[in-house]
């Protein structure tokens, strides 16, 4: 039985639909992320789980028990927001002890727990400092420590790293995952950052328009998107519209090329499809052949390099393939010889790396 369930939840704010039949479930000890663009409803979903907002319809269950009518303070959940929400007139230790003091824990027990969670988040010995004496990353660690101190049944995190510098954000997300694994805490995490969601989650729910587009492991979301929105939102993707020529053999026509793709087998003849290829699945080299080579195995097409985008370890090439249209290709930045803008090149990919998505309603 799932540990935390959101069942067919609906929520409106006036005429605006925030959540539309939202359903998902977390297992105990799972790190589960809600990923989506601004306005998709992910923060509203978290607020309903926390008890800050009430759904218009639907249920929230914790360990099989409905909690719609349970006040937020009685749900035994920790919450970490993008803004640190630390009390500026309290020391770090006093901030961490706040929830324990509300729960009437003894002073010695509060001090012991504060020391434990400060050690856990990598801030031992800083209990006497005030928030203004800490960096942004340190303040967010204190916010996490405060939420963990009460030993919540579920830890809710709403864009907790988005206000931090990129390097600090990377360090802290690794620390969060390490802490979650060590404690076995059930985490519901909200983010718009794809890299963040894919790197630290056990599973991810991609949201749009108040509902779930797809739920899966990070690799399932990235490698096997089930909808066009997921394919376009998660990671860079080459998208080529095509149609099925022969569904029995998997033959499709895209622009001027005809390919046989295993992923297209079984689709009806004439059906419109979307060909999906990740930039890292393509290879590029100075041109040594001519035209496209259809069939099972690999496809190679002549192209011209139109632009470069340096991304550090890789450079993303924009190439115009004679028969396949515009393609983006990721190339190790150290291997750019012969790939200058304007160069004629060959772009190739394995047909096994191609995903085919039906566009038929």
Image: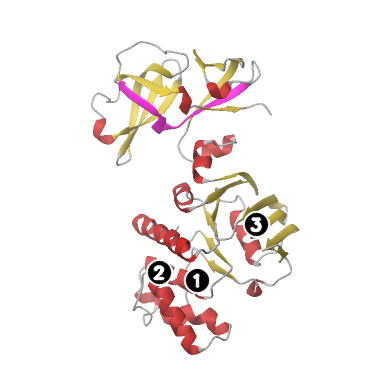
Q: Identify residue for label 1.
A: 148
The quadrant of the rendering that contains the C terminus is: top right
Q: Identify residue for label 2.
A: 121
Element marked by disc 3: loop
Q: How far, Cα to Cα, is label 3 from label 2?
A: 28 Å
Asked whether disc 1 touches disc 2, contact meaning CB atoms under 8 Å apart, the reply is: yes
Q: How many labels does the image show?
A: 3
Q: Is residue 274 magenta?
A: yes
Which residues lie in the magenta part? 272-285
| Residue positioned most to the bottom | 107
The colour style of the image is secondary structure
| Residue positioned most to the right | 57
Element marked by disc 2: loop
In the image: residue 172, left or right of residue 74: left
Mark 3 or 2, closer to the camera: 3
Element marked by disc 1: helix
Asked whether disc 3 touches disc 1, contact meaning CB atoms under 8 Å apart, the reply is: no
């Amino acid at each position: 039985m799932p540990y935390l369930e959101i069942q067919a939840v609906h929520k409106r704010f006036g005429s605006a639909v925030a959540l539309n039949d939202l359903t998902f479930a977390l297992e105990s000890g799972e790190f589960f992320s809600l990923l989506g663009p601004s306005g998709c409803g992910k923060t509203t979903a978290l607020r309903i789980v926390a008890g800050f907002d009430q759904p218009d319809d639907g249920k929230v269950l914790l360990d099989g028990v409905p909690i719609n009518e349970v006040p937020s303070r009685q749900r035994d959940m920790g919450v970490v927001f993008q803004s640190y929400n630390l009390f500026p007139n309290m020391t770090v230790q006093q901030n961490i002890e706040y929830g324990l003091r509300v729960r009437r824990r003894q002073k010695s027990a509060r001090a012991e727990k504060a020391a434990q969670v400060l050690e856990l988040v990598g801030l031992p010995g800083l209990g006497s400092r005030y928030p203004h004496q800490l960096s942004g990353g340190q303040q967010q660690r204190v916010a996490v420590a405060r939420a963990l101190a009460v030993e919540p049944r579920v830890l809710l995190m709403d864009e907790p790293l988005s206000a931090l510098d990129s390097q600090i954000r990377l360090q802290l997300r690794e620390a969060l995952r390490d802490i979650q694994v060590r404690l076995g805490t059930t985490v519901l995490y909200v983010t718009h950052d794809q890299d963040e969601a894919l790197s630290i989650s056990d599973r991810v729910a991609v949201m749009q328009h108040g509902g779930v587009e797809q739920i899966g492991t990070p690799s399932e979301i990235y490698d096997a998107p089930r909808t066009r929105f997921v394919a376009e939102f998660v990671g860079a993707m080459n998208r080529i519209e095509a149609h099925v020529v022969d569904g029995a053999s998997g033959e499709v026509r895209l622009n001027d090329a005809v390919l046989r793709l295993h992923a297209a087998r079984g689709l009806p003849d004439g059906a419109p499809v979307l060909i999906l290829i990740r930039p890292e699945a393509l290879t590029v080299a100075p041109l040594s052949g001519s035209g496209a080579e259809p069939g099972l195995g690999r496809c190679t097409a002549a192209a011209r390099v139109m632009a470069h985008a340096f991304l550090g370890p890789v450079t993303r090439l924009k190439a115009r393939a004679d028969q396949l249209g515009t393609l983006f290709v990721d190339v190790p930045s150290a291997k750019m010889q012969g790939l200058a803008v304007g160069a004629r090149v060959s772009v190739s990919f394995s047909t096994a790396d191609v995903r085919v998505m039906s566009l038929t309603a």
